[in-house]
Amino acid sequence: MAEVAKAAGTLDARLRAEQQERAEQQRLAEQQRIQLEARLAIVQQEKAAMSRLRETLELQLKEEQMKTASLSDQAASLTEKLSEQQRLVEHQARVNARAERKLQAEEQKSRRLQKQLQSFTVTMEEVSKVLYSVEREEKVAASGSLSRSERKVRSSAADTLRQSLAAFKAFKEAEVEPEGPQPDQDKQLLA
C-alpha cells in the first residue's frame, strides 16, 4: 500500500513537472508568436509607408517633368530614389513573407503542443484510475477475494491505460519536431 502511494506520489510529481514544462513551452511559443505578430504588423506598416512614399515620389517626378526640361537632373535623382524605394519595398516583401511563414510554423508548433498536452492529460487520468483500482484491490484482498465484475473493471482500466500510453507514444514519435519528454523519459512513464 505504501509502495502504491509512493508510486502515485512519484507519478503526480512527474505529471506536475511535465505539465509545468509544457505550460512553459506553450508560454514561450505564445510569446514568440506575439512577437512575430508585432514584427509583422511593423513590417506591414513600413510597406504601406513605402508605398505611399513611392506614390509621392512618382507624383513629384511628374510635376518636375511638366515644369521644365532643364530640371532633368533632378528628375533623374528622383527616379533613382524611386528605384531605391522599389528595391526596399521588394526586400520588405521578402522579409514579410519569411515572417509570415515563421508565424505559421509557430502556430502549428503551438497546436501540436496543445494536442500533446491533452493526450498526456488523458493518459494521466487513466493512470489515476488504475492506481485507484489497485488500491481498491488491495483493500478487497485484505477483506476477501475480488468479485468477477471487479476483476473485469481492473483489467479494463489497465488495458485502457496501456492503450492510452501506446497512443501517446505513437503521437510523439509521429511528430516532425519532438516536443516534451525525450524517449528515455517515455520509458520511465511506461515502466
Image: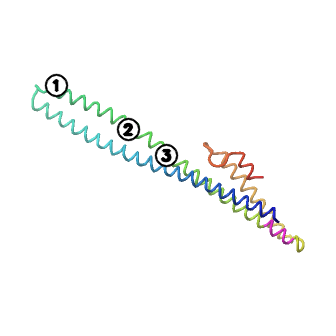
Residue farthest to the right, as pictured: 144
Q: Position of residue 129 (x, y in %)?
A: 74, 65
Which label sits in the foreground, 2 or 1?
Answer: 1
Mark 1 or mark 3: name the one nearer the start of the chain.
Answer: 1
Q: Are marks 1 and 3 in contact (CB under 8 Å)?
A: no
| x 58%, y 50%: residue | 112
Say which label, 2 or 1, has the lower sequence index.
1
Q: Tell me the kind of residue under disc 3.
A: Gln
Q: Quadrant of residue 19?
A: bottom right
Q: CA distance from mark 1 to mark 3?
A: 47 Å
Rendering coords of residue 104 (x, y %): 49, 46
Up/down of 87 relative to 138, above or below: above
- Residue at (9% x, 32% y) in the render: 67
Q: Is residue 104 magenta?
A: no
Name which residue lies at 69% across and 48% down. 170
Looking at the picture, which amino acid does disc 1 mark?
Asp
Left or right: 28 with respect to 143?
A: left
Under tag 2, what secondary structure? Answer: helix
Q: Position of residue 108 (x, y in %)?
A: 54, 48
Q: Determine the image quadrant of residue 82.
A: top left
Contact? badges 2 and 1 (CB < 8 Å): no
Which segment is the magenta one?
Answer: 133-140
Which residue does the numbered mark 1 point to in the structure image?
73
Q: Which mark is residue 93?
A: 2
Q: Secondary structure at mark 3?
A: helix
